[in-house]
Amino acid sequence: MLYNVFNTEQDALDAQEESFTMFMAMHSDNPNYTSTTTAWDDVRRRNDGKWVFQLCPACDPDKHTTEEYEDNWFE
């Protein structure tokens, strides 16, 4: 599973919001889904201080730095 990786929380939050917008455009024909969904993924801080969230399927994987998930990222 690929994750977008950022140095700051704000950069991650901004990118997650952009991903959310793109993701919701894929579901614009489903008002029940769009009325209950509030984010693409939670932004989380890894043990090394980097900020990450799962790569959105609607987004370009080359737009941000991505890394494959590792078990030691979180406590």
Image (spheres, rainbow, N blue to C red):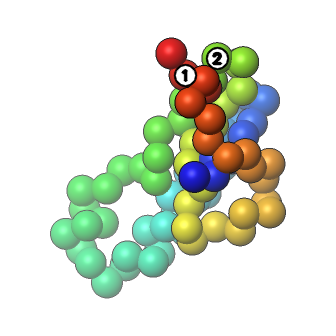
- Kindly identify the amino acid type of the residue bearing the numbered disc 2: Asn
Is 21 rendered above or below residue 74?
Answer: below
Q: Label 2 belongs to which residue?
A: 47
Q: What residue type is labelled 1?
A: Phe
Left/right of residue 2 with respect to residue 67 in the rendered view: left
Residue at 74 percent of width and 49 percent of height: 66
Q: What is the quadrant of residue 57 in the picture? A: bottom right
Secondary structure under the numbered disc 2 in the rendered image: loop
Badge 2 or badge 1: first in the primary sequence:
2
28 is higher (above) or lower (below) than 20: below
The single residue placed furthest to the front in the displayed view is 71
Q: Which residue is drawn at 79% across and 60% down?
A: 63
User: How far from the left and from the top, in percent, is residue 64?
Assistant: 78, 53
Q: Does the residue at mark 2 contact the one at mark 1 (Cβ under 8 Å)?
A: yes
> Residue 74 has which mark?
1
In percent of width and height, residue 21 lies at 52, 63
Q: Going 36% across and 50% down the picture, which residue do you hit?
A: 38
